[in-house]
Every structure is written in structure tokens, then in C-alpha cells.
Image: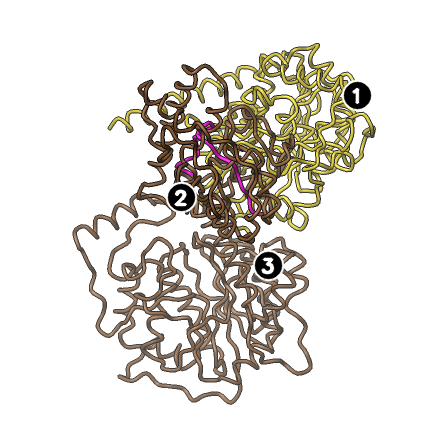
Chain colours: A yellow, B brown
Amino acid sequence: MKRLIRITRRKLRLRALRHYLLGRAVRRRRRLHPIAVRTRRIRRGDILLFMSIRNEKVRLPYFLEYYRRMGVQHFLVVDNGSDDGGLEYLSEQLDVSVWLTHSSYKDSRFGMDWLNWLLLRYGTGHWCLTVDPDEFLIYPHHDTRPLRALTDWLDASAIKSFSAMLLDMYPKGTLDARTYHEGQDPFQIAAWFDPANYTIRKNGEYGNLWIQGGPRSRAFFRDNPVQGPALNKIPLVRWERSYVYVSSTHMLLPRSLNLVYDENGGEKASGCLLHAKFLSTFAGKSAEEIERRQHYSDSQEYMAYHSGLQEEQDFWCEESRRYEDWRQLEDIGLISKGNWA
Amino acid sequence: MTAPEHEPPVPALPAKVRLGIVMLCHNELPLAARMAEVWAAGGAVVAIHIDAKVAAEEVATMRTDLEPHEEIIFSRRHPCEWGSFSLIRATQDAASLLLDRFEDVSHVMVVSGSCLPLRPVADLIAFLAQRPTRDFIESVTAEDVGWTVGGLNEERFTLRFPFAYRRRRMLFDRYVELQRRLKLKRRIPEGLVPHLGSQWWCLTRATLHAILADRRRPEFDRYFSRVWIPDESYFQTLARMHSNRIESRSLTLAKFDDQGKPYMFYNDHRQILEESRCFVARKIWPRATALYAYFPRPAQAEPSAAEPRPERLDRILGQAVSRRRLGRPGLYMQSRFPLKDRENGKTAASYALMQGFSDLFPDFEPWLAERLDADVHGHIMAQDRVEFGGRAQVGPGGLSDSAALRDLDCRGFVANLIRMSPRMQVIQYSPRDQQDLNWFMATDPNAQFFIITGAWAVPLLHSGMPFDDIRRVAALLQRTELEQIGTLNSVWLKARTRIWDLGDFCARPAGVLRGVLRELGGDPDAAANLPEMRELAGMGRFLQRLRNAGLRPQLMGDFPVADPAPSKESI
């Protein structure tokens, strides 16, 4: 009986939160100014990609190409006032719709209010991928099967959300040793990752797993690991009107969407977001973000990096592995095929 | 079709095989049309049933596309729902139509629009020609089936299922539960023995005709129309009544995963599919264009009647099922986070915990490392820092030596350490360390504990700390170790344990170490050179002082108060 009361109270609490977040998203839609909206090109069953960016022009060509090849049919982008020509570049692309906003990134819950609105308005009924411009999705068989094969299989298995944890990639040597050029595959430079340095805890309230660790925790948060970045992500969701991202793409509501893991010993299918953050572009970016103080906990993360990076931070260690393919990640146990043979 | 006679007429066996195909389609019609053409080109006749729910324009396109083919016909359309009798009705109609329209059809096979013939149709015909009277239908008695999902096998035949499984799941489950509780049962018609099996069968004309023209068919149809998923039981059961030449297997490769959902094949399965030498495969992902382009293989000059060999494919799909159901032991990750005691293997490989040894022998770690094929670490669970072997800053798998990071997820830390190392892991342990994992390790069959109880007193003896502090620390450590020992003596213990008290150990250290080496796979004789041991003189006096201070040492064994400790003994 006590348990029932607890569960019911949680249910009501989370429903209230979900409605509040949806309300925020709807109210803030007016702050998005359409620059090039081509959403009429979206067909039934198309796979859509949502992201918000600021000054990421150098990354865009490779990013768009990567996801186009994977099978994303339309990109919906919120630009938070880029001044590097990224906005102009995006508005020339025929499969991209762009909105511009000069509102505060922080006040929009780090862009999630904007994206929740776009997801609600355009994502309903579609498989939606919500990523940052430095995140590259990897899933089992991605080299031989397009994203559509995965989403069809998820549909057939009645699965509504797909987990892909963030895997920090880094170069061997200091970050500025090799310069990243526009259009280049970032993983030619940032080719290394930590194979098993991850801590997992379950978040009872939302039902999701908190995954932390990786090179950033190892290098910057060793005495204060709780402050370290969260690596659990659920970027691929078959969107419904009632869904909402709560905190970045780490967790969603309703709660059932967060249950992407098996609790009886089996493995569900999962993928990875390769994180191409640690490139030569990073030092400039972190200086800028500290200045703007628009990131999580007053950009504390960036401050930590910045002080580390001043001393020419090198994430590489003896145990680092060089990225080969998804099978390697599967063997290590970072991702799983589940029963998608 | 009517059958006035008591005995249904058995038509004479045709001299050669003419294959009839019943094709059930409910979506992807263009693809189905192509498959129909493939079958027809191979010399088969095809009767297509299209779900009545498919839009009229699509059907019209398909009909015009297939117009030129005389050997492709369309049967009356029924609205089909998964798991309902309408599928049987559709099959019956299409099959009767085939038998009526084409006198020379000798075998009828059921396929779906998304079934892909892998080998030339001529191969299948040659295969059947070698066994012209066999009925290929998987048919297993309901009691022995064991593969159905949801636990319903026999009950499919004895309960009622008025609610749709997919749309009214809750009502479906409740109603099944209610009938079980009230012990409500339907009567199975006289003479029927319930059998289950794949709905993709291939029957001879004689058997099929006997089923369709049976005098009691209205009775059977009425009965089966209330059975759950009759397409897996109707023909499978009735074939047993009318044929005694049943080969209980399906010629169609159709594998199901543990949710009862058919496996999908993709372009990258091409080679495995070809090697399987199966005649027909399902399901193929509709966009797997490379498969559709490659299969069926072109007919050879001489058709091959070789048996299918799906073993390798079976193994791969079996692995996928076990990956989904059991997972990899000792793996904790984003999509596998088992609850306590549901891990199917808490850790990936065996490991050992050595408690008390490093307290007695300051150089125990390097000594042991020399004598074992294993990674010997220090106190991995130490409170202040993770002591990897050689005191590396970064351990296996990139694990950090920060105790704070480890303590966020101790279980994951230890499981990763063991899973990422090719060799056995040997860990020093002590009541001074972080104790959160005691139950986890005690219930893990991979763990081996070697414990010298009370050995933590030896460093205290030499610590030179004020006696008040020593007493307080000793009380704490003793309480911790007693709790540990309690855990290791519980009925839930799965680990292997060897426990000595300090007195015991000191009586014959070499003998004990020899046993330890033997159990860890080392050479027992290598224990001859003992590492340097800390001086134990004064231990008796020390323990007496603790007693005098009101703390009863319970774990050290016997040390006489006056004598110098028995640190030298014969080996």
C-alpha cells in the first residue's frame, strides 16, 4: 500500500513536471525566428534530426554529410546567434530548416525549450534524433544498415527510445597539436577513447541511468566525480506529442522512455554517440563559453577544462584504445546488439 | 467445396511435381508482385490473397501488373488480423482455388509477400520430386512444444480469446487469468490432437484436399475460429488426422526471437543466407535491395535437390537470443544494468582477495606476483586511493586510481577491472578498506577469499600510535572483520573461502602459502622462499593490553601473554 502511494505520488509529480516543461516549450516558441523553414518537405516516416548550435560552422559540413549518409532526411536547427557564417551556410542547405534566436541559452534550459517545441511541432510521429553538432551516432551494424533499418526494427519490437551513451574521443598528444579543418573526419584526429572507465548509477525518480566517467572525469573531476559530466543519452526517440526532454538528452518524460536497459541480466540494443569535442577548436570554444557563462553550473565544466588545458592537457594514457569500428565497442561492452542479429 | 462421400476422394499422384503457391500479402504489394513473378517464372502457379484492408488503388496496380501471367490468380479477399481465424479462411480459399483451377498441382506451399526464395524454384521442385508423398509441415504436440511465447500452448486450445492480443492486451491477459482461476475449459472436438508449428508449410495435394473436403470441416472451423493464433495450429493439427507421411519441419527459414517476433534479414546476411541453402527465407527487410537483387540464385542446368543446412544461421540467431536474455556475465553498461542477484554472472572471471597477508609480509605483492600468472594489485578498495599493481595512476580499461570515482560505483569498478584484464586479478583486502562490496563478492562464485583474521593487529603493534588511538582503531577493525566473517559464513555464500586466524597462520606460514599458491594455479614449491615477515614478538602482551583496556580480541587466535611470539617454526 505504501509503495502504491509512493508510486502514485511520483506519477503525479512527474506528470506535473512534464506539463510544465511542455508549457515552457510552447511559450518560448515565439523567441524562435524562422530563417529558412523547409518543413513542408518532410514526408511521412522521414527520420529527423534536431539540434541547437552556436558558432560551429567548422563542424557543419562533415556533420551534415555524416547524418545524410546515415539516412536522416531533414535537419531542424536552432541557431543561437552564430557570427561565423554558420547560419548562412545552413540556410543554403535544402534539407535544413533553421530558426534564429538571440535569447539566453541558459534561460531556455540549455536550448532544450527550443528543441522541445520543434520536436512537439514537427517531430510527432517521426523517429527523431536530437544531438549536438559534435556528437556522431554509432549503432550496431551501422556500417551495413542505414538508420532506417534500425528504426524499422525498433518499431517492429515496439521500442520507443534508443540509448546511445556519449563516448568522449580524444587525440594522442595535446589538443592543439593537430588542427581540425572544415569537412574533415574529426575521428582521424580524436581517435582514442577510454574503454571501461565509467560509473553507472540508477536514478530512481526518472528511471534513467546516470553514467559518468571517461577521460574528463579521470583528468578533471577525480576528487569531485559527482560534478563530472553525464554521459547517458537517449537521442533517438519515436516522438509523440506528450514527450519532453527533461535535462539535455539525458532523460525524458514519460518515465518509461528512460527504461532503455534490461534489469534481468539481458542486454538491450544500444549505440554510442562519439563525442568529437576535444579538437584544436576546443581551447577557443571554452574561453568563449567561460566568458558567456551560459552553460551548466555557470560553465564550471569549461572552467575546469580551461585550467587543465592551459597546461596542455593530454587525455591519452596507456589504457586508451584506438577506435576501430562498432564491433570493437560491442566486444568491450560499451554498446550491444541485443537481439538485433 | 463439398464432400458428400464419407471418405474424401484421394486423387491419384501426379507423375511430376507441379508446385502451387499460396501467397498471403498485407503490405508492400509491389514487392509481393515481384515475388509472385519469381515463383511463376520458376514454374509454380500462384494464388494471391490480399488483405481486404489494403487500399483499392494498390490492389488494382498489382492486378494490372500481374495481368499477363495466367498462372497467377487472385483469391477472395478477407480482412486479416494477426492471430485470428481470418488468416485460415484466406489460406483455405486460396488453396481450394489452386486445387480447382489447376488440375496438375501436386504440392501447395504457403508463403507471405515478404518471403524470399533463396534457391531457384526448380531446386525446390526437384527436392519435392524426390519425396513426392511427404507433407512438410512442422507439427509438434502442444504439450511438448516449449517454444511459444507467453506460455500459452495447450491453453490455446482450451481457453477462449475474445480480445485482440495486440490492441487489448490488458483485457486479454485478465480474461485468460479469469478462465484459469475458474477452471473454464472448452471441449476439443472428438479425435483432434492439438499440434502446433510454423504456418509456412508445404502439403501434398492429397493431404490438403482431405483437409479441405473433410465432412467434419464446419465443426473444425467453428472450433478453430475460437482458438488463439489458429494459423499455427489448424493445418498442423488436421494434417495429423489425414496424413501419416508427415515430415515435421518447415521448408521456409523463419526464425523467431524471444519476443516471438520474426527475425529480419538485411544486406549483410547475404553470405550466411546463401550458405544456409534454405529454399525460402523470411522476413527480409523490405529495403534490403541487395538481397532482392541477389536472390533467388539463377537456376543451374541441373537442379539441385540438396538438403538445407541452416545450422550456422541457427547458431548466430541463437546467440542473439541468449545475448538478449542472458547477456554477458560481469557486464554493467547502458543497456544492461541487472538488479541484485539477477546478474547471470556477477563478474566475468575468477579473482582472489587476500586479506591480512600484506599486513604480515610488507613485500607480499611482488612476492606473489613473481609466483603467479596473475595481476597482483594492492588494496584496490583502499579508502584513500586505488592501489593498482605497480601503483599505476590508470588501471585496466582506463580506470582511475581516484577513490572518489571508484566509490560512485564500486560494483562497476570491480566488474570492469576483472572484465578488462585477460589475466586473473588478485586483490589485497583488509577491514581498513571500503566494505560496500562484501555481499556482492561473497555471493559471487568467481570470488576466492583467503583471509588471515586478526592480521590487521600486526601493523597496529608496530604503529607507535598512542595506545588510546590503537584501542579505538582495533575496536573498529575488529567489528568490521567480524561482520565480514559473518557474511562469509552465511547460507548465501557462493564464493570459495579459506580462513585462518593469526595464531593458526603463524604456526605454519609456509604450509598455508603453499596451499594458496596451489589454489591460485601457481607452483606450490615456490612458497619455499618466504617473504620477510613482520616481527610478532610482543603480540601476546599487546593483545593482553587490549583486553585490559576492555576490548576482547576475538580473531587473532592464541598468543601466550609472556612468551615471545612463535614466529619461527619448522617447515
Dot 2 falls on a residue whose secondary structure is loop
Q: Is residue B269 left or right of residue A317?
A: left
Q: Please name which of the two marks, 1 or 3, marks the residue nearer to the observer.
A: 1
The CA span between labels 3 and 2 is: 44 Å
Q: Type of residue at label 2?
A: Arg
Check disc 2 and report the residue beneath it. B342
Q: Is residue A302 left or right of residue B168?
A: right
Q: Are marks 3 and 2 on the same chain?
A: yes
Dot 3 falls on a residue whose secondary structure is helix
The CA span between labels 1 and 3 is: 46 Å
Start and end of the magenta stretch? Answer: B424-440
Q: Chain of mark 2?
A: B
Q: Type of residue at label 1?
A: Gly
Give me the disc on residue A85. 1
Q: Is residue A260 above or below residue B246?
A: above
Q: Chain of mark 1?
A: A
Closest to the observer, B41 or B446 = B446
